[in-house]
Image: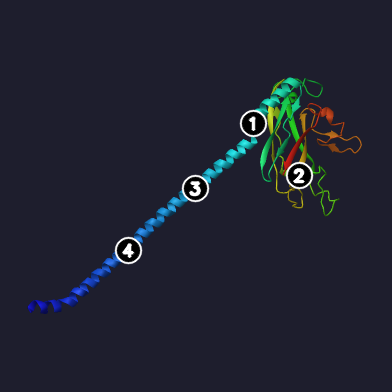
Amino acid sequence: MFFSFFFLVSLPKVLQMASREFKRSSIRHHKKKGFELQVTFLVVMIISIVIFISGLYLMRQFFTATTTFQAQIDADTQREIERRLSESGEKVSLPINRKSFKVGEGQAFGLGILNTRTPDSQCSAGGALSPCNKFGVMVRFVKAVDSKTQQSVTDPANPSNTNFVESAKINSDWISVMPEIELTANQLKVVSIPVKVGNIMGSTNIPTRRSTIFIFNVCVFNVARGSTATDTLSGKEIWCEEGKTQLIPLLHGQKILKMYVEVP
């Protein structure tokens, strides 16, 4: 009887204490759970940042390797150019002069130059840095033709629009300025002509046309002789243009080479 009475009297206090303990436990549980969530969140953030940085690094390495590869001349092309210059006696050679490009893509053409120059009135004898041993390469856009019809590309809305395919735009944006090349007597060297097909082919933001072949002239000249001639009729300078007899004597090899950039 006594124990029953004691149990009944003590029950509310026991329940109250149990309730308080449950609340404390619940709070501790929530705090612990909250702490665990914070730690988990930090771990996920750190892993995400590491993966993101690693991805950027790998992308940079990939594109750097791709750019380096495209800017170089492959070994087969190098050997073919050297063979032609050595066996044929040619002074300049561009054996692989046609390549296919995607818009935005960059590649390089291989150009071989053999220094056969001997001193003359315009090129005095001297050491390795003599004007006789310095050469320049000029690349100039000529015209664009349709890949299928081979007809010149014109503005369909205005055929007389001469800026539809603009030479100045392509020469400045697609072609890199070539540095001077130093060659000692009878030295042969293969250099790369980098080309990157831009998104625009005209000054009025005309997008680069597909199914088109963009044709370029390539001129190699001796620095001592200069890179341009003067047209006897118009008095204007001639920049690597065909059909100009005044220019040919200035060119190394006395010829203009062709380069074809095809955009499928």
Q: Which mark is residue 257?
A: none
Residue 21 x, y percent position in the rendering: 23, 69
Viewer-proximal residue, 239 or 189? 189
* Residue ID at (55%, 41%): 61
- Left/right placement of residue 164 relative to residue 175 reads right
Viewer-proximal residue, 44 or 179? 44
Residue 145 x, y percent position in the rendering: 80, 43
Specify which label sits upstream in the sequence, 1 or 4: 4
Q: Which mark is residue 212?
A: 2
Front position among marks 2 and 4: 2
Front position among marks 3 and 1: 1
In this picture, is 210 found above or below 114?
below
Q: Quadrant of the N terminus?
A: bottom left
Q: Find numbered disc 1 in the image and state the secondary structure of the residue it sits on.
A: loop
Specify which label sits upstream in the sequence, 2 or 1: 1
* Residue type of the residue flagged with mark 3: Ile
Specify which label sits upstream in the sequence, 2 or 4: 4
User: Is residue 126 shown to the viewer in this render?
Assistant: no
Total label count?
4
Q: Quadrant of the C terminus?
A: top right
Q: Which mark is residue 74?
A: 1
Residue 262 x, y percent position in the rendering: 73, 41
In this picture, is 128 found above or below 1?
above
| Residue 232 picture quarter | top right
Residue that numbered label 3 is attached to: 53
Specify which label sits upstream in the sequence, 2 or 3: 3
In this picture, is 97 found above or below 121?
below
The Cα atoms of the two marked residues, 3 and 4, are separated by: 33 Å
Specify which label sits upstream in the sequence, 3 or 1: 3
